[in-house]
Amino acid sequence: MAFAVFAARRLASMIWVMLFVALFVFSLLYLAPGDAATVIAGEDTSPEDVERIRKGLGLDQPFHQQFLIWLGNILQGDFGISIFSNIPVLELIGQRLDPTISLTLTTIIFSTLVAVPFGVIAAWRSGSLIDRSLMLFSAICFAMPAFVLGYCLILLLSLQLDLFPVQGFVPISDGIGPFLLAITLPTLMLGTVYIVLIARITRATVMDVLNEDYIRTARSRGLSEREVLIRHALPNAAVPIVTVIGLGFALIIGGVVITETVFNIPGIGRLTVDAINKRDYPLIQGIIILTSAVYVIINTIIDILYVYIDPRIRL
Amino acid sequence: MKFRNPLPTLALTVSLVLSLPALALAETTIRFATGYDLESIDPIWTTAGGAFRHGYMVYDTLLAKDADGLTHPQMLESYDISDDSLTYTFTLREGLLWHDGTPVTAEDCVASIQRWGARDGAGQVLMEYMSAMNTIDDKTFEMVLSEPFGATIDTLAKGAANVPFMMPKRVAETSPDEQITEYVGSGPFIFVEEEWVPGSKIVYRKNPNYVPRDEPASDVAGGKHVHVDRVEWLIMPDQQTALSALMAGEVDILESPTIDMLPIVDQTEGLTTTQVNRDGWVGMVVPNHLHPPFDDPRAHEALAWLIDQEVYLQAIAGNPEYSKPCASLFACGTPMSSDIGGEALSGFDKERARELFEEIGWDFDEPIVLLNADDPAINSSILLTAQALRSIGLTTDVQSMDWSTLAKRRTSTDAPEDGGWNIFITYGSAGSRHNPFFNASYSAACADGWFGWACDEELETLRAAWPLGETVEERQEIARAYQERAFTVGSPWIPFGQWAEPVAHSETVTDFVPIGTGVVVFWNMRKSESAAD
């Protein structure tokens, strides 16, 4: 019962958050300079034609009128039609979901699998060569712009060693082999900063836990170091680690824009940038609303996960 | 007698026979990396570059201009002009089919011209002269004018956006203010809608029913023979990635590599460059005629004295092989170009520029607002212009923004201090700047004119007179008079040279057709298995 109330409260707060996001996004775009009419009209056109196109698109309507029409349509599941491609926004987003979801999932899985053990070992062997290597690796990865790493990976692993394709995306439905070949370099690029982030948080949290009395007690009971780490230290350090994995989702959403550009992946990130450059308002609004919804849902899931991971957290 | 084991021979024969169908069916695909997205699928609804390029893939035109600027029938078998120059009769070629297999008819062409004429600037002028368009039979239609319009044929052969592309009647009946929703043309390639991923990939396949003309291809005129089965446009916003993909053989052609990439292309085995943008780009410094100091022609002259075209072109194109200074308002190397009135553009004189600003009585502490955009060529040119203005003691305020913002901002007629502007820079296809008539940027119609709002009645008169000139010589006279007047009273824009990047491509791709407007076309192009083939 308590869980149901908790979940209902979380869902209700989600609705308010989404409404606020909708208003904020719409206002921001309304205030932003530039509009689609100038892009449609092109370079060799007269201001009169630009104005005619603007009116045709309804961009000359007052703010509240445009917002209410848009909100009413959204509530009915109608996200509108892209001004440029003349294709429904949901269809356009649907075309781009597969690459972005694939890249996000491979990045999260890869980063977590690498970073958590790395962080635990670094904490366990604090001050050792492994620990120092981690710190050095972290400093380098944080300092290096992701796109530079991307180009280095392309130069070395694609052009020199011919191991992976330079660019593009292959859906998993075309075979797991080609899919993995195409997604490896983007995952490495996007995952590096994420690995460093998770590994550092894991290291710090596990080090704190390892200094707790109950760890000393566990060791005094004769438990092996492995058992101490896996059965006692890691579960107690899990909440901050899960938090950073969840928060890292936002990092990935931001990071895909660059990764998708460097590796020419037709995902949501590139769609967003293209839509903004062209001022394709229905598309920008649709993407932001849906991305925000996913972000809010993931955070809600993480909140709920806390309860299972650490029973001390009350609903 | 020795017995030979027949199995290896048999196996070889069987494998060869089995592979024959595969060899016969092997598709030739050209993968073209470009930074241009297909903004819209309707080349009449927008003048944007992507739609314009798409138009030449999918659609065809009644008439077309060749590399020498001469107009030829394209979809037409012939055309006839009555003695009084009021009636134009057009006859379509035999065998023309839309992509859906239905024949191209005169009715289709009439509807297409009407839609284009409602949208395109030059088309709108032609429509003002037109009293009727009548279908005579399936293959013939006539255009009746109210008074002679000498540029009728040239207007219908217009090669820059909006190009009068022909569409089926049911498609052409779409309002010109709405986008078409059916993509059926009669051009050399068919748009594969189901494989279109907007912003990422556009696919075309060869039109098996296309009937090319017998004449050799020349610019967008002549025989459009297609030697490949499929063309894939891969939208790659990142040039470095596109170059890497070219080097790895993942794409065949890279459009517009940056200057610093060209030496890499030259040094890479199997890659080469070809100049296909015949006329290139024209750089334009656009002063705002509404507000001081550029409401005074002397400020325009001063600005021209400060523009050192060699320096601008060095910053943009780097290699003189890919650029040329041009002191003409009309693309250099084309019939209307001349250097009349462009003395200030041919020199660089800071002292003269300073004197002119002093004569005007301009306050040197008053900032001149320059709009800068996120485009390498615009950015370089704006910074050079600001530097030149500062070098004579003027104050500048360079405001940076993305292109969409600039495109909106330049529509503002407010004073610079209230959100307006003094100068912006852009560049356009030299192929669409051959004369004062076809391009809106030559307008001097004050508030109804192009951004910058040049305002001069005589310029407008000359502009309107150009298409009425009956011979090339007459039109040259009018173009020269326009240019001389423009440089005297303040031109709508000041040119700073022409440049053109070559395309980088695999040596396996050959037979490019150079085009004046810079659009890459895929007819006549061949792709072999290896460069030696």
Image (tube, coloured by chain):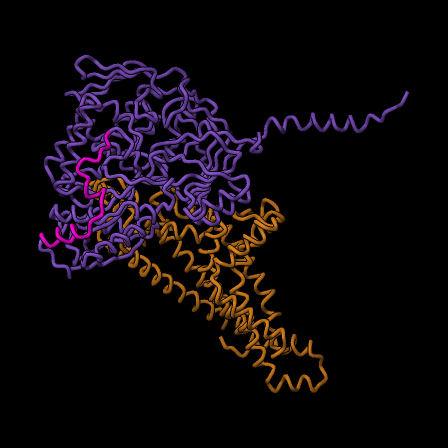
Chain colours: A orange, B purple
Asked whether the viewer can see residue A191, the reply is yes
Residue plotted at (21% across, 13% down): B82
Asked whether A255 falls inside the magenta stretch, the response is no
Tell me the quarter of the picture where residue B16 sits.
Answer: top right
Q: Relative to A266, is B420 on the left or the right? A: left
Where's residue A108, x and y in %? 55, 61
Instruction: Note whether B411 is above or below A140 in the view shown.
Output: above
- Image x and y of residue A83, in percent: 33, 44
Is A78 or B123 nearer to us in this picture? B123
Residue B27 in picture, x, y percent from top left: 56, 31
> Residue at 15% across / 39% down in the picture?
B486
Residue name at image x 32 percent, y 22 percent: B62
Query: Does the magenta portion include B351?
Result: yes
Which portion, as a residue range, is magenta? B336-359
Give the quadrant of residue B323.
Answer: top left
In this view of the protein, can residue A86 be seen by the observer? Answer: no
Query: Residue B70 or A227: which is nearer the viewer?
Result: B70
Q: Quadrant of residue B224?
A: top left
